[in-house]
């Protein structure tokens, strides 16, 4: 296996700048110079984006910036011991020991395990003391290799052993009745460093307090589940996670402490104390499951949320799970049209039924690509159409999932399928999903004998909720909703001229209002819901899709244009780096590429983006631009009708947004633009 760290990747006692960005860029350059990354900028952008999500400073003057990046060709560790400390966000102050972990996008499990082992070593005082005492780059390499091989730090490079630490508190300190038992799960988005450091910090804190604490690390290399007997015997559970816990139902009913993974590193003792307190508190929050008591507890917790917040959360859950079906299906349909022409929609079934390239239907005009193009076009079109057919069922299923968890999925899918069958479309999927979720949640609250509980989530809840929700759709709601959907479709199909431009303005404003948030998703869902009904004879749904996609591309492209071309001095270093990445994000129709700018300066960025998005939406509708694809941005140009004006509309909107933003930054100034955060003073 390739050595993770070499002397070439180590820098000792240098001043690398005053900010995390300076240090990360320098170490990314080290990795690239060692031939382990294809480019510096791409690696830096990925690492700094990870840093902005969660600061990587940990107690003890340590920082571990890390990322997975497509720019990395071989896993690498780069290390810097700084002459001037830099603030990486740790609670106890700035850091002087920096380890940069660079992993490929598809890193193998063995390398990930080694990288994780290094992260765990960094919370050991003897190891960090040896790092500070090392005199050469090779000493650092030997120390790291020793840590990866589980050798004591003092033997790895001849460093002096630190003074003995205080002995842990006896077990009786926890409780006169014996030690408490706690289980924990740690997980971070990257799953390389914080996951394992939090685990070791919690275990160490538990040991000092006389608590039997066992941790399940859900990292990049997968995870080994805790023994069910250990979970059953636990008095409480700690979730130190930044992502969803896998297999959360295993901990159902246990008192739980929830916190970000970094708190498990910064405040492990406090978390253990909170878990001990929760273990004896009958009112403590517990991990929910589908028993009556836990349902009641979950309902009590949810009661503090406003109704609008609850509805928004479940609708966004449904939309987020629906989008992959729509994006994949729409792109496949577009590719089918590319290979088989638009006529493929009417004859795909005949072509596939013939099951041969030489026996094509006689009423089908052979496309320029020939019989092979026609046959492949039919295959792609049919796969895409079938995928797109899951739009409404998936929406209903995962709205119900957002309300009732897994028992709601089947009733929601069935209600969505009924909605599609009755012609109620997207609106019917929304209503059916809500009905199925509420019904499943209600049935799950029933108090049933213990022997029946196992059947509730897999048989009884899906059966009864499907009957209720789908029955109401068939007997009461489906018809009226279908009438509304058909009327809306007819109204949109009849929009021309000024009314179409107004619709484009509204959609553009919505797409740029919250950059991937609820309002943005409503506009996007409205567009994709009608995509299947679009055709050459009914282009209105395709025009709406084009206007939505074009407007959604404007904010990131405008941020990139302003920060990297038109006014570099008006933006901070971090914003300029984000601007470089925003070019690709914008071209790919990922509106979220503008979020770092909006988060830093919302009162200038969001209004600017909305104006530019409205201009683009209006131009796209005025020019009659159409899109057969629901996603992909510039990379699905083959699916865009009037593609030249599509790009013109986007370019105009991006320029308008960029110029307005620059003007606001210059003439609506609250503080000097170039002012950077002052470095944290370090005591002599």
Image (tube, rainbow, N blue to C red):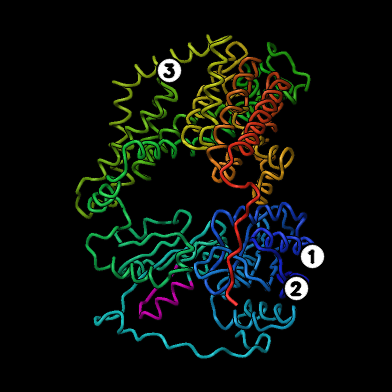
Tell me the number on the disc at residue 485.
3
Residue 355 on image: x %, y %: 66, 26
User: Which quadrant would the C terminus be assigned to in this image?
Assistant: bottom right
Residue segment shown in magenta = 200-215
Q: Please report the residue visible at 28 percent of the width from the left and 67 percent of the height from the top.
A: 279
Residue 260 in sight in this render: yes
Q: Quadrant of residue 193?
A: bottom right
680 falls in the magenta region: no
Mark 1: few/some/many CA within 10 Å (<14, 14-19, 20+)? some
Marks 2 and 1: in contact by CB < 8 Å?
yes
Is disc 2 placed on a helix, strand or loop?
Answer: loop
Q: Is residue 231 above or below residue 321?
A: below
Q: Nearer the viewer, mark 2 or mark 3?
A: 2
Q: CA distance from mark 1 to mark 3?
A: 60 Å
Marks 1/2: CA distance?
9 Å
Q: Position of residue 682 (x, y in %)?
A: 59, 72
Q: Where does label 1 land, which residue?
A: 34
Which residue is the site of mark 2?
Answer: 6
Give 276 or 670, whichever is nearer the viewer: 670
Quarter of image, res 52: bottom right
Q: Is residue 431 above or below residue 39?
A: above
Residue 12 - label: none
């Amino acid at each position: 296996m390739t050595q993770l760290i070499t002397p070439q990747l180590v820098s000792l006692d240098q001043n690398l700048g005053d900010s995390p960005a300076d240090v990360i860029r320098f170490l990314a350059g080290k990795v690239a110079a060692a031939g382990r990354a294809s480019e510096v900028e791409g690696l830096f952008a990925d690492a700094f984006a990870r840093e902005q999500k969660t600061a990587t400073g940990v107690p003890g003057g340590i920082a571990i910036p890390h990322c997975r990046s497509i720019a990395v060709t071989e896993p690498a560790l780069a290390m810097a011991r700084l002459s001037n400390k830099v603030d990486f966000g740790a609670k106890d102050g700035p850091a002087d020991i920096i380890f940069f972990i660079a992993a490929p996008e598809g890193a193998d499990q063995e390398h990930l395990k080694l990288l994780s082992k290094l992260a765990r070593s960094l919370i050991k005082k003897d190891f960090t003391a040896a790092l500070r005492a090392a005199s050469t780059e090779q000493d650092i390499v030997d120390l790291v290799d020793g840590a990866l091989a589980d050798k004591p730090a003092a033997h790895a490079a001849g460093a002096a052993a630190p003074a003995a630490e205080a002995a842990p508190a006896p077990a009786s300190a926890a409780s006169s009745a014996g030690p408490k038992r706690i289980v924990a799960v740690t997980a971070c988005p990257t799953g390389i460093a914080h996951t394992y450091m939090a685990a070791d910090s919690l275990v160490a804190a538990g040991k000092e307090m006389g608590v039997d604490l066992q941790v399940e690390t859900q990292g990049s290399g997968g995870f080994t589940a805790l023994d069910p007997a250990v979970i059953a015997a636990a008095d409480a559970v700690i979730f130190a996670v930044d992502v969803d816990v896998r297999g959360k139902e295993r901990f159902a009913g246990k008192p739980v402490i929830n916190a970000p993974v970094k708190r498990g590193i910064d405040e492990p003792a406090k978390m253990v104390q909170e878990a001990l307190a929760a273990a004896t508190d009958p009112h403590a929050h517990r991990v929910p499951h589908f028993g009556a008591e836990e349902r009641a507890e979950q309902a009590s917790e949810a009661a503090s949320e406003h109704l609008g917040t609850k509805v928004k959360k479940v609708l966004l859950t449904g939309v987020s799970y629906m989008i992959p079906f729509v994006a994949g299906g729409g792109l496949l349909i577009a590719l089918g049209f590319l290979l088989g022409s638009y006529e493929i929609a009417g004859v795909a079934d005949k072509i596939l039924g013939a099951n041969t390239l030489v026996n094509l239907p006689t009423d089908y005009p052979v496309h320029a690509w020939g019989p092979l193009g026609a046959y492949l076009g039919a295959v792609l079109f049919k796969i895409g159409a079938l995928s797109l057919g899951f739009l409404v069922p998936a929406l209903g299923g995962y709205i119900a999932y957002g309300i009732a968890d897994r028992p709601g999925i089947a009733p929601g899918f069935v209600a969505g399928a009924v909605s599609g069958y009755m012609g109620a479309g997207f609106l019917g999927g929304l209503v059916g999903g809500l009905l199925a979720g509420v019904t499943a949640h209600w049935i799950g609250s029933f108090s049933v004998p213990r022997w029946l509980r196992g059947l509730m989530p897999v048989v009884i809840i899906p059966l009864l909720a499907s009957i209720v929700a789908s029955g109401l759709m068939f007997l009461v709601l489906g018809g009226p909703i279908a009438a509304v959907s058909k009327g809306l479709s007819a109204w949109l199909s009849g929009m021309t001229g000024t009314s179409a431009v107004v619709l484009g303005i509204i959609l553009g404003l919505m797409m740029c209002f919250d950059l991937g948030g609820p309002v943005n998703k409503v506009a996007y869902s409205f567009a994709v819901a009608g995509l299947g009904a679009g055709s050459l004879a009914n282009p209105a749904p395709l025009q709406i899709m084009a206007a939505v996609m074009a407007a959604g591309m404007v904010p990131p492209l405008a941020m990139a244009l302003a920060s990297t071309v038109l006014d570099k001095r008006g933006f901070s270093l971090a914003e300029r780096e984000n601007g470089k990445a925003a070019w690709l994000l914008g071209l790919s129709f990922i509106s979220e590429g503008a979020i770092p700018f909006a988060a830093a300066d919302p009162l200038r960025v969001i209004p600017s983006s909305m104006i530019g998005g409205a201009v683009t939406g209006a131009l796209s509708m005025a020019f009659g631009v159409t899109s057969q694809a629901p996603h992909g941005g510039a990379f699905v140009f083959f699916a865009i009708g009037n593609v030249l004006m599509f790009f013109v509309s986007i370019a105009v909107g991006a320029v308008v947004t960029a110029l307005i933003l620059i003007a606001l930054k210059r003439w609506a100034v609250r503080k000097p633009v170039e002012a950077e955060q002052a470095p944290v003073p370090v005591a002599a």
